[in-house]
Image (tube, grey):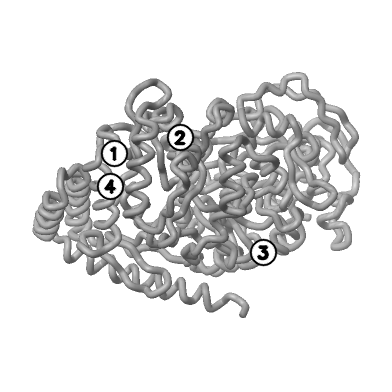
Amino acid sequence: MKHILKKAAALALALSLTGCAWNQEVVSVSPETAGTEQDPLINNTEPITLTVFSVPANWSGKQTGWGAVLLKDMFNVELNIIPDANGTYETRMEKGDLGDIVVWGNTGTEYKQAVDQGKLFDWNEDDLVETYGPDICKYFSLGMEANAALNADGKVYALGNNMANDAREHDLFIYDWGIRWDLYEQLGKPEVKDLDDLLEVLKQMKELCPKADDGKPTYAASLFPDWDGNMIMNAKSFAQCYYGYDEVGLGLLDPYTGDYYDALDKEGPYVEALRFYSRLNQNGLLDPDSMTQTFDQLQAKVRNGTVLWSPQDFSGSLLYNTEQHIADNKLFASLVPEEARTAVWGLSTAGNERPWSIGAKSVYPEKAMQLLNWLFTPEGAMTIQYGIQGLMWDYDSNGSMYFTDLGLKCKNDPSTDLTGVKWTSPDTGKEYTLTGTFNDGMLQFNNTTWAQGASNPDGDGEKFAWQTWTSVQGEPKNEADADWRETTGAEGCQQYLDETDYSFIPMANYAEETRSPELDLKWSQVIQRLKQGSWKAIYAKSDEEFDKIIDQTIQECKGYGYDECVKWSEKQAAAKYQLMLETLSSFPE
């Protein structure tokens, strides 16, 4: 009502200035019509432009393509996307207007400043979310409670991304243990019980396939330093995918026992991961460029067939399994050692980073909430990922999800040109002719709502992630795939991994304590030396040299304050483990 009055007053003033009389009654919104098709606050006859200030956005300007067509048809809105360029946040805060919809990069300093300075809309004010966000209330009441707990006043100003309404579910496996199955099959599929067995298999695969597609040497593994953090990423990740531990500070946490292993524990998982890569190197199985190449260079090598094994899908199967390799009966497929306990992370009912908010100065908070509500429906989440329902994806008679021919083409190649494609709206019956590429039409918030690993309530229990859909598995891709399916009894990678003895790491509402400036300085010196020593150990020419390098790295790191860093890390690990236990205790029996 107050928003109608505001607009009515402005119109009355404009008419009075032109000498016109205006006696029309202001139409109120009754409780019975609020949020319904009769509600003028969300069923506007004229188009409304919503300003979206999105910190992670890579787009500036109006939403275009199929996304613009869909939103105009469904909500009669147009979006103006404003990314967080240099100074944009500060300027908008100074003006006091962040926009109608705000997408944050995290719930850190900038978000907290906006809350403290009253720049965000309270979702419970005037029953905003209850009236205009019924699906948010239906699925994500826990997410709103979690946000309220973050704010000093206990009010709800945001809802996180990658949401789930069941914390017992886990996300997709990113550690898929991909190996050249066609070569493994030629070797007679020998037993791979532990790392010793894996090393022997990789030796034999190298002998069987010494050259890549371009005629250059193959290697069992190829690494890269781009994503190194507190530790070398590839070694830390290998410790996670083999032992099932979670990274905390300068070490790894066992989510089942609470045991914590600092990075330089000589019997710990990180050093053992370094030792395994060193053994690969000693046998000529590690790409000598691993310490210096970029991730882009690694990707090119995987596509070229240089790499025979990768425990991570993003540096293995997702790159290698091209149409040409499939046609040549080559395949990266999952092979988990019997003793491995692959880590997979639970989903969060509290939401992850990149939360969604509504600006306090929005003239259209009801419209903004209506749009957010739809984005948090199963249909909205699917649209964010895959495009328009009915045109690019849909549900079959059993409720299972599938791609249309056009949708599959867009999924495989997001640059697919949609110019001239016709779409008839099931809501309005209007026919539209699309323009631009599929990528152009993607909703340019650069954010998500439902987690990909969550079960779609509208999708017969299938997850939102297309890799899990029954329709996508189809017939075996080639003879190697047929053999993998027969051997594992699974139709797809995620199903296979789900049936292994994986390590479930429950999502905990955890945030690291801020380190003191003194400790932070020591931390930066320690991790720099730790990573230098880690890479040096990987390239050791013998086990004796490896042990010597680790001892030297320990001594030098201790000189920089390693013990203090570990003590701080142990405190963080204990706190995180306690929160994990609380999450587990909340699960129904």
Instruction: Kindly identify the amino acid type of the residue bearing the numbered disc 4.
Output: Tyr
Instruction: Kindly identify the amino acid type of the residue bearing the numbered disc 3.
Output: Asn
Looking at the rendered image, the quarter that the C terminus falls into is: bottom right
Instruction: Kindly identify the amino acid type of the residue bearing the numbered disc 2.
Output: Ala
The residue tagged 2 is: 85
Tell me if 586 is positioned left or right of 197 in this view: right
SS of the residue under disc 4: helix
Quick one: label 1 or label 4, which is nearer the N terminus?
4
Instruction: Kindly identify the amino acid type of the residue bearing the numbered disc 1.
Output: Leu
SS of the residue under disc 3: loop
The residue tagged 4 is: 277
Residue at the location (65% across, 66% down)?
A: 141
- Spatial CA distance of label 1 from label 4 is 7 Å
Q: Are marks 3 and 4 in contact (CB under 8 Å)?
A: no
Q: Are marks 1 and 4 in contact (CB under 8 Å)?
A: yes
Quick one: label 2 or label 3, which is nearer the N terminus?
2
Percent of width and height locating residue 23: 90, 44
Q: Is residue 312 above or below residue 253?
A: above
